[in-house]
Image (spheres, rainbow, N blue to C red):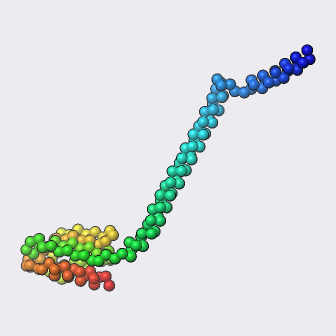
Amino acid sequence: MARETRSNKTAGKKLHNLQGLPLANSKHFYKNRADKWNSVILGYMLCICKLKLRLEVMRIMKVMTVKQQYLPLLETTAVEPKVTVNKVGKGYYEVKVTCERKADMLVSTLEAFESVGLDVLQARVSSENLFSMDAFAVAQDHGDIDASVVSQAILKSLKRHER
């Protein structure tokens, strides 16, 4: 009989220990499980965000290295001045100018038009990367000027401006 009481006592202790554990159908068990899954999901989302940031940093670094490699090449390449003059009618000219961008390019180009005897009726100018000008001009005395003379005068003005 002494043996039975000992085994009953140990069995009672084990039963008492199991009663303290949360059961699968208790609210406490599901709450802890949900918290655990939420923290796991948040951990994965945090890892994904960190990976996305690393990829973005790698892309930016790649762009910066390409920029560092090619920017000096772009700065050293010189663009030869190009002037195209098309005669549209008697005394009317369409002029296109493209050259490197420098200070006061518009002024020197307009002075070249004036020196040849042309008035600019309409012009579109861009100086973002290069200086470019599309102009429509008319001779001051409505006479006829050779297109090559206009072209040479503008080129001369641009080359003088380069010095």
Q: Nearer the viewer, residue 3 or 54?
A: 3
Q: Residue at x 9, y 71 (%)?
A: 89
Counting from the top left corner in percent of width and height, residue 145 is at: 11, 80
* Residue 105 figure quarter: bottom left
- Residue 3 located left or right of residue 119: right
Q: Nearer the viewer, residue 97 or 76?
A: 76
Counting from the top left corner in percent of width and height, residue 117 is at: 14, 80
Q: So how many labels did they put on this image?
A: 0
Q: Is residue 101 visible?
A: yes
Give above or below for 97 relative to 8: below
Give above or below for 43 relative to 6: below
Q: Residue furthest top?
A: 1
- Residue 154 located left or right of residue 57: left
* Quadrant holding the C terminus: bottom left
Give above or below for 95 relative to 115: above
Q: Residue at x 81, y 21 (%)?
A: 12
Counting from the top left corner in percent of width and height, residue 114 is at: 18, 80
- Residue 54 located left or right of residue 116: right
Q: Residue furthest right?
A: 2
Q: Residue at x 53, y 48 (%)?
A: 49
Q: Residue at x 16, y 82 (%)?
A: 149
Counting from the top left corner in percent of width and height, residue 137 is at: 15, 73
* Residue 40 figure quarter: top right
* Quadrant holding the N terminus: top right
Q: Is residue 120 visible?
A: no
- Residue 23 located left or right of residue 114: right
